[in-house]
Image: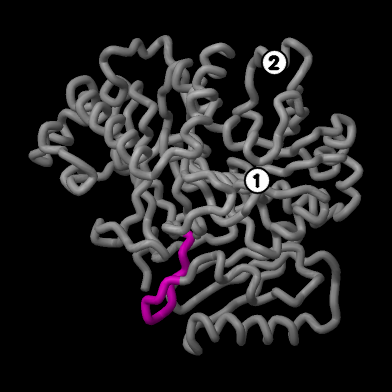
């Protein structure tokens, strides 16, 4: 409902410049209320807290967070919806949000229209800060299963038009639809935007987009430059998930990702569950401070990110993530146990090679990597370039690593339309 969403937006915009202490107090108030609500009304959490010997009265502040056990997707998938949804909500009246299932079985999260409106307001707050205007036209390249069924209040008035384009359409068709619509902003999966930019280059500038919003996957610095240059537009990356909504976003200063700390609590933990210090990589654990329909408390996102205590020059006081490194199962591991982020690996082996469209690394074990390569064209010195790439890879992984190159016509997208740059079988197969 537009009036409610507008009300949320006005409230949220006031939080952009809150003092950090006030923001923390707001988080604490919301978190404590959610813990009590989950214990009283959600069967899954009542059991989980009881088994852990935890009661809501035991929680006195964020120093006590470790008393509350974390929750994994696999635990939730084993439960019935009635066990996960608060008993004061009617299942038949709720909205289902289903994860892409790109790394396994999808998870369904339940919300109501009120929570949906709040998430919409969080998104709108961030894109307005990036320079979007209320009446701007936006093209959205996404999974067709997420296309909205109707028009928003503004769209019914003939403003803020949206054109939804399937990620499964060919690049040629996507470009044609963009040129026909001529949006002020383009939003899409990072891989879809990169494929378009790499294929058509500065021809995309004829679309006339002023802003580009990317998400769902990570773009490395080289890919960001390609996309921004091709569209002739400023690129803003967003960090989000179906389970918890919009987590963090880039502003015009591009000094990191502002965490939407008034709607989500993010923790960055080491392998022992302790908070890492700012600047260190940590696995991301999150809590939606908004969704009381199906509370998710200390939910394991299976991502790795780096938090920073830097203050952004843009003036927004929301805390920052320095970088999102990728999914925990996308982290590469060397023979001696060192962990290498995809943001370090890509595009390092082929950073000076212009005939490679894209490549993917498959880690079969700590001592074997398969590099899938999709070329733009045939070349004569392929073996020489592969030898150079292999030397670079061994400089990261050690001389004992076996590197195999596999040339493919096209690196396929997964069933959700995403391009997985790293596939690791180590955890799945228990290999060393």
**Disc 1 versus disc 2: nearer the observer:** 2
The chief SS type of the magenta part is loop
- Span of residues in magenta: 330-339
Q: Which image quarter: residue 93?
A: top left
Q: Is residue 331 magenta?
A: yes
Decide: few, some or many residues near mark 2? Use Cα within 10 Å; few <14, some 14-19, many ≥20.
few
Q: Is residue 215 magenta?
A: no
Q: Is residue 49 left or right of residue 397?
A: left
Quadrant of the snapshot with the C terminus:
bottom left
Q: Are marks 1 and 2 in contact (CB under 8 Å)?
A: no
Please tell me which residue is depicted at 17% across the width and 35% down the height of the picture. Answer: 48
Q: Position of residue 321 (x, y in %)?
A: 47, 54
Q: Is residue 24 visible?
A: yes
Q: Position of residue 320 (x, y in %)?
A: 47, 52
User: How did the renderer colour the structure?
Assistant: one colour
Q: Position of residue 136 (x, y in %)?
A: 76, 28
Residue under circle 2? 154
Please tell me which residue is depicted at 73% across the width and 48% down the height of the picture. Answer: 193
Q: Secondary structure at mark 1?
A: strand
Residue under circle 1? 214
How much space separates mark 1 and mark 2, taking CA atoms? 23 Å
Quadrant of the snapshot with the N terminus:
top right
């Amino acid at each position: 409902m537009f009036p409610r969403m507008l009300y949320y937006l006005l409230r949220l915009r006031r939080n952009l410049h809150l003092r950090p202490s006030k923001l923390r107090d707001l988080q604490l108030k919301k978190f404590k209320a959610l813990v009590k609500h989950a214990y009283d009304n959600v069967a899954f959490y009542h059991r989980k807290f009881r088994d852990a010997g935890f009661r809501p009265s035991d929680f006195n502040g964020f120093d006590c967070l470790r008393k509350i056990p974390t929750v994994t997707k696999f635990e939730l998938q084993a439960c019935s919806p009635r066990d996960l949804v608060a008993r004061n909500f009617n299942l038949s009246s709720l909205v289902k949000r289903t994860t892409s299932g790109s790394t396994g079985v999808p998870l369904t999260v339940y919300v109501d229209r009120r929570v949906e409106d709040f998430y919409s307001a969080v998104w709108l707050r961030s894109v307005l800060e990036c320079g979007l205007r209320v009446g701007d036209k936006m093209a959205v390249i996404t999974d067709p299963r997420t296309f909205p069924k109707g028009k928003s209040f503004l769209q019914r008035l003939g403003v803020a038009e949206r054109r939804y384009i399937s990620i499964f359409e060919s690049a040629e068709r996507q470009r044609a639809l963009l040129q026909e619509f001529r949006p002020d902003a383009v939003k899409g999966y990072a891989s879809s935007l990169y494929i378009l930019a790499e294929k058509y280059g500065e021809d995309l500038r004829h679309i006339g987009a002023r802003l580009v919003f990317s998400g769902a996957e990570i773009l490395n610095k080289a890919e960001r430059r390609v996309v921004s240059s091709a569209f002739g537009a400023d690129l803003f990356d967003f960090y989000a998930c179906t389970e918890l909504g919009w987590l963090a976003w880039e502003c015009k200063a591009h000094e990191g990702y502002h965490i939407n700390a008034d709607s989500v609590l993010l923790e960055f933990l080491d392998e022992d569950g302790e908070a890492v210090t700012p600047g260190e990589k940590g696995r991301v654990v999150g809590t939606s401070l908004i969704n009381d329909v199906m509370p998710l408390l200390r939910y394991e996102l299976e991502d790795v990110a780096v938090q920073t205590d830097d203050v952004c020059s843009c003036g927004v006081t929301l805390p920052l993530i320095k970088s999102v490194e990728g999914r925990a199962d996308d982290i590469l591991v060397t023979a001696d146990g060192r962990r290498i982020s995809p943001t370090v690996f890509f595009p390092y082996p082929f950073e000076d090679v212009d005939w490679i469209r894209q490549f993917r690394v498959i880690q079969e074990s700590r001592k074997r990597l398969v590099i899938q390569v999709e070329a733009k064209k045939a070349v004569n010195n392929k073996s020489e370039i592969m030898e150079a790439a292999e030397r670079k890879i061994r400089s990261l992984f050690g001389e004992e690593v076996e590197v195999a190159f596999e040339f493919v016509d096209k690196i396929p997208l997964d069933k959700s339309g995403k391009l997985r740059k790293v596939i690791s079988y180590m955890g799945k197969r228990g290999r060393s």
